[in-house]
Amino acid sequence: MIQTSPTDRERRTRKGNGKLIVVRREKNSITVNGHARYEKCGKDIVCAAASILTQNLISSIKELTDDKIEYEIEEGLANIRFLDLSNEGNILINSFFIGICDIATNFPDCVKVVKN
């Protein structure tokens, strides 16, 4: 679990500008969209954490499974599409959501997870 100091909590409240990362889980896709705006570009630990989890999910599915996925990544947006994931692929996605939900719990003004 990520521990935050009181100054981190205060900073999140001060920056409550409505900007956030939305992670959406559909039956055959995951979309990560937006910017955390926790800090300025290049110093935003929340955005960096969400980005690396997303990139690691894509790399892990490609390297550790035979699952076929399609994905696109651009600044502030990642779309991952898949069909019929293996057990291993599902475990990797579950692991991604454990990490991203931990971030959302600790930085609720920065990250929102939506599962449909």
Image (cartoon, rainbow, N blue to C red):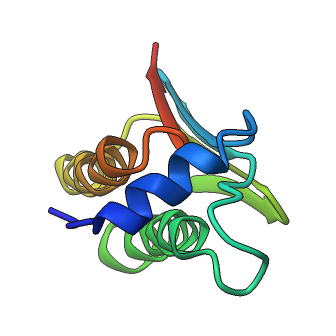
Quick one: 52 or 63, which is closer to the camera? 52
> Outermost residue, bottom direction?
42
Image side of residue 47 versus residue 59, left or right: right
x, y percent for residue 37: 71, 58
Q: How many marks?
A: 0
Image side of residue 82 versus residue 77, left or right: left
**Which quadrant of the figure contains the N terminus?**
bottom left
Is 9 located above or below residue 113 in the figure?
below
x, y percent for residue 49: 47, 71
Quick one: 51 or 80, which is closer to the camera? 51
The answer to whether residue 110 of the structure is visible from this angle is no
The residue positioned 60% from the left and 66% from the top of the image is 47
> Outermost residue, top direction?
116
The residue positioned 52% from the left and 65% from the top of the image is 46
Is 101 located above or below residue 58 in the figure?
above
The residue positioned 31% from the left and 62% from the top of the image is 6
Quick one: 11 or 42, which is closer to the camera? 11
Image side of residue 3 versus residue 33, left or right: left
> Outermost residue, right direction?
75
x, y percent for residue 63: 40, 80
- Specify the quadrant of the image occupied by residue 2: bottom left
The answer to whether residue 43 of the structure is visible from this angle is yes
Quick one: 29 or 69, which is closer to the camera? 29
x, y percent for residue 19: 74, 41
